[in-house]
Amino acid sequence: MQFIMLARNANLYSHKRLVEAAEARGHEIDIYDTLKLYMDITSHKPELRYQGRAVPKVDAVIPRIGASITSYGMAVVRQFEMMGVWAANESVAIGRSRDKLRSLQLLSRAGIGLPVTAFAHDTSMTDDVLDIVGGEPVVIKLLEGTQGVGVVLAETRRSAKSVIEAFRGAKVDILVQEFIKEAGGADIRTIVVGGKVVAAMKRQGAQGDFRSNLHRGGSASKIKLTPEERSTAVRAAKVMGLNVAGVDMLRSNHGPVIMEVNSSPGLEGIENATGVDVAAQIIDFIEKNAVPGKTKTRGKG
Ligand code: ADP
């Protein structure tokens, strides 16, 4: 089969692994820099162009869209969908997962476990906002943060209020969340492919850090999920409409709670921790499911 992977950096571990896995199975795969593709969006015969040439109509497109280029990346994926090219993750699903508030609302509506979370624009009712999530200690998060940057634990009401005021003063959107103390600075990262958990690891934060991000010095190990954790991860990916997803959860006293559902999960940490060939699982799934013109949303929505 012929695949196109949308990625800005061909040298990232995850991207190299996906290319290796595709080629090992006899497929052709080309990487296109998402931001260098351009298109006539009004054409009746939708196409994408790259360096002066039309991009071929391949069997599948594998979007690896970084958070900083979500909007343009989604337009590119949507254009592929309009051309009838099957996408490993559809543009609508990528967009949903990138909007933290919308994601939490969708997961909540589906009855999936979440930390109690509040969101407000105005800071005049901060006391009430803090009460909603059960009072301090609380976790305050930048809506646009990644890799644990902009995730703050406020242990007293005074510090919570000053952090909220500082963030709001800087005109950034935040959410306030119940602190899941019993998670003990660890979280669970699972990779869901085609409705199945293919790999799961536990990430433990560095000593004294409640954040478990590997980029912040956390360590990872393979774990066995409980049936409830497994089904929570699978349902979360399904609610977002993602075929390929990284689902992050915490172990709370009230069962697994979702932190985030990621449409372009990194493969390095989880492949190293679990020994699972996640890239091969993704390619196998695409191989079995890519059918031209079968994009469910056809770029709509
Ligand atoms: P990012 O997307 O920037 O990684 P997360 O929301 O995943 O931010 O938070 C980073 C880490 O902080 C999580 O992996 C988890 O270990 C910890 N954390 C986040 N929210 C909570 C919470 N409500 N309770 C306890 N720990 C949390």
Image (cartoon, grey):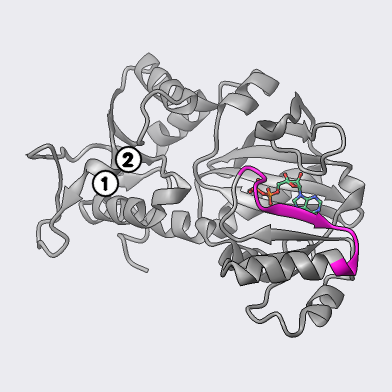
Q: Is residue 85 left or right of residue 208?
A: left
What residue is rendered at 68% in x and 45% in y? 248
Q: Which residues are magenta?
A: 147-158
- Residue at image point 26% right, 51% down: 293
In the rendered structure, the answer to whether residue 105 lies left or right of residue 57 reads: right
In the rendered structure, the answer to whether residue 14 lies left or right of residue 225 reads left
- Which quadrant holds residue 197? top right
Query: What quarter of the picture does the N terminus occupy?
Result: top left
Q: Quadrant of the C terminus?
A: bottom left
Q: Can you give x and y, in whole percent of width and height, for residue 235 in the image?
A: 65, 54
Q: Is residue 278 above or below residue 119?
A: above
* Residue that badge 1 annotates: 85
* Residue 50, disc: none
Q: Which residue is mark 2?
A: 61
- Per the image, is 41 magenta? no
- Can see residue 37? yes
In the rendered structure, does residue 151 fall within the stretch colored magenta?
A: yes
Q: Nearer the viewer, residue 272 or 225?
A: 272
Q: Nearer the viewer, mark 2 or mark 1?
A: 2
Q: Is residue 14 left or right of residue 29?
A: right
State the image coordinates of residue 271 (x, y, percent, origin top left): 61, 23
Residue 292 horizontal/vertical position (percent): 26, 45
Name the residue at 33% across, 66% down: 300
